Amino acid sequence: MSKNALYGIIAVVVIIIIVGAAAAVLLNKPEKEKPSPPAEESIVSGTFTWDTIGDPQTLDPAEAYDTASGVVIQNVYDTLVTYHGTDTKTIYPSLATKWEVDSTGKVWTFHLRKNVTFSNGHPFNAEAVKYSFDRVLIMSSPQTGVSWILSQFMYTYNATTGKWNSPDGESSVRIIDDYTVQFKLREAYGGFLPSIAFTVASIVDPKVVEAHGGVKPNQDNDWMSQNMVGTGPYKLVEWKHNAYIKLEYNPNYWGGWEGKHFKYIMIKNIPEVATREQELLKGDADMAYIPVNHLNDVKGQEGIVVDEGGLTYNVDMIEMNCRPTYQNKTNPLHSKLVRQAISYAIDYDTILENIYMGYAIQLQGPIPKGMPGHDDNLFMYHQDLDKAKQLLKQAGYENGFSVTLIYNQGNDVRAHIAQIVKENLAQIGISVEIQELAWPTLLDKMDRGDYSMIIVGWAPDYNDPDDYAFPFLASYEIGGDTYRTGWHNDTVDKLLMEAKYEVDQDKRAQLYKKVQEIAMEDPSFIYLAQWKHVAVYRAWLKGYYYNPVMQLDFYHLYKEE
Amino acid sequence: MLIPVVIGVTLITFVISNVIPANPARAWAGQKAPPEVVEEIAERYHLNDPLYLQYYYYITNLIKGDWGYSHSEHRPVIDCLRDYFPATFELTLWAMIIAIPIGIYLGVVSAVKRNKLPDHLSRVFALSGVSMPIFWLGLLLILLFYSYLGILPASGRGIAPSHTYTGLYLLDSLLSLDFKTFLDDLRHLILPSITLSYATLAVITRMTRSSMLEVLRLDYIKTARAKGLPDKIVIYRHALRNAMLPTLTVSGLSFAGLLGGAVLTETIFSWPGMGRYAYHAISTLDFPAIMGVTFLMAVIFVIANLIVDILYAYLDPRIKLGE
């Protein structure tokens, strides 16, 4: 290439850039907000910017099973029933206005809200309800298996015969008329209403799904995992993976737009906490996810609110391997006395104060505080080294033994817990070898029962004790024991099954009370901590509230300087 | 060249990923998934088959253009790469556009003014570039240009252009004649590309300096000076051209290396690129994604080497291609 040609090209590129920049400056006038109030007193304006972590795995409610997906789905789709504000005790109407249940607890009739449309203008009716529930069970998402939440009490679909596994071969959901549906459940389920308030029971538009791949047995819908059409307050504008999700208000929303609301929602995925902090402090983010060990960076700063309202249902525990043998040797943890001794050896107060920085309370048994079925008077372990030593002696292990304690790589909180537990157990003669493992390796060891102790956590699916007590304490044989502790108690199995299918909530509470007492007397877990909730946002953000079983609600947020 | 390298790389990656003692199906399905779901995933993706069969399935699918399904993102690997590769490519491209000219210039100045003030300054600058953690540099730049001065944004790629032609935001916004977006995207590129370029810039400076010092001692330079040629011509036309070969090699390999290794920069600046994708894939045992990224990187390394070889021939007439 001759030199002149090269200079020519450079000159052209430079001119393009200069002209481009000049044009950009000239054209770069602030865009005028289009006035868009659908009702007279409504002010729908501005953008709510939320700096958080994690990208949704999917936007399809029939597939989604992670928090990042849940928050978008909850704001774009609606369910039949829901929770309001901070109240976890009452179930409120949403797309259903009222409902009745028969004496068996198996037949539920829902009366649907009229004049509701999807964001594309299509009508919402009984057909959409039946279609949405049937879809979850036919799809039976092979990626996440989230349909189990519905299939615990609804009839499942047989892909080979194309029929439902019900007496008449029909699905659980029956259309009575355009605005009435009936659920004929396989089993009366105590947690029925809370579980259909979860995102998996969101109502989708049948026409949209049929136009994009329809419903195929045991197969996820690729289109639905990237696109959304719901009846909720917001609609999806754009999803740039690992970068941001932009939502815009849905003018057709049945709840109306009176009062103040945000027009746009910007959920930004920012993995680095320092970057999130800077954007929040600068005011470019209205709200940011700040982990508790960084709260001091933002506390007391002008214009920042650190909102410590309420308890979450997020819990941390240490599971113990209760099998008689471990790695072909006698497993000391098989002994109830040893597990009691370990529970007495842990310094809960130090862990809560120094590691959780006071942002957690001691977990009182398998059902967290605030959830139905929780027992405020349940026995809790406190550190008592003499008692622990005495129990070990009684179990025949006064000379101690050694165990491994596993936690997942990159989890700082658990790394620190492991250190304290190691010191605590050394005081009663048990030597602990700490192992930090990658998450998949940890799960593999858990599945094979190849561990002594693992630090684990749990987050709620829906607001019911069955979502906690059953996976923790029911035996593997009846579909419980998610953590593979190998703990097995026939009485507890019986009580848990009874509680699952009991619809009288007072009776259920009594059953769970007994379960919790047994679980504390013969502990398969060290019940460590229940996290408090902390939200960090700009003082101009109003309308924020926290409900442990719901995701962040954008509809009620607004800005007021 | 391409075929054996690619087969070798995919085979090694495949074997290494599969010796990890863990059940990928369990990792993909999540902690709460019932055992039936885990088993079904294992069955669907041939995870119960022997390794050589799994590799056979992978390679035959790859040839057919099917890169597999990314379990961490619940969509095909090729869709993920289509999103993330251009982001990283654009960032790396700008990092190299910053690093190469400045690195070479500093290297030359350093060599010519050996042991004088400019040399000392540029050596300190280069040394700090090699030794400063990228992470720290990124945070400092954010503090200065975003928090205090408030002139540049701290996160993301900016507004997405209305049309996607190449996935490179700057190019796409120019092609769609959307100068507002262009400007916004350019502002978003500045801090991350400076951060990413610094280490490479430092390496190029040091490399250019040492090879320039060697060349400047040679007889033909003395001859050139004796002829009375001006300094500029001696340095830039006679000396630099010969001193460029090692610099070129380093630049080519750095370019390919940065494409895969920009994970820290991408994390600090929330840049939705391939490094973060790969990191997430590794931590969730998303084998198809790991394989896809590795395969793409192997191809890029081969291409980068090829380009370097061609440029060698241009710079050094003694090297002839195809002989």
Image (tube, coloured by chain):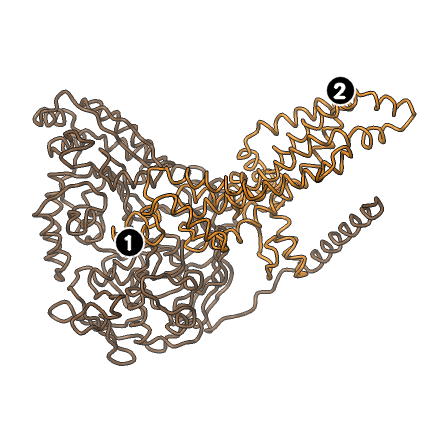
Chain colours: A brown, B orange
Asked if residue B264 lies left or right of residue B212, the reply is left
Q: Which mark is residue B37?
A: 1
Q: Chain of mark 2?
A: B
Locate the C terminus of chain B by quadrant. Answer: top right
* Residue A307 image point, x, y percent: 37, 47
Q: Position of residue B20 (x, y in %)?
A: 36, 37
Q: Residue furthest right?
A: B228
The residue tagged 2 is: B116
Near-viewer residue (B139 or B224): B224
Which of the 4 quarters of the picture holds residue B240?
Answer: top right
Whether residue A311 appears in this view of the structure is no
Q: For the residue labelled by badge 2, is the local secondary structure a helix, a strand or a loop?
A: loop
- The amino acid beneath tag 1 is Val
Image location of residue A48, percent across then percent down? 48, 56
Nearer the observer, B132 or B164: B164
- Kindly identify the amino acid type of the residue bearing the numbered disc 2: Lys
Residue B176 appears left or right of A367: right
- The residue shown at (43%, 65%) is A228
Disc 2 to disc 1: CB gap under 8 Å:
no
Determine crowd level at label 1: few under 14, some 14-19, many 20+ residues with C-alpha closer than 10 A. Answer: many
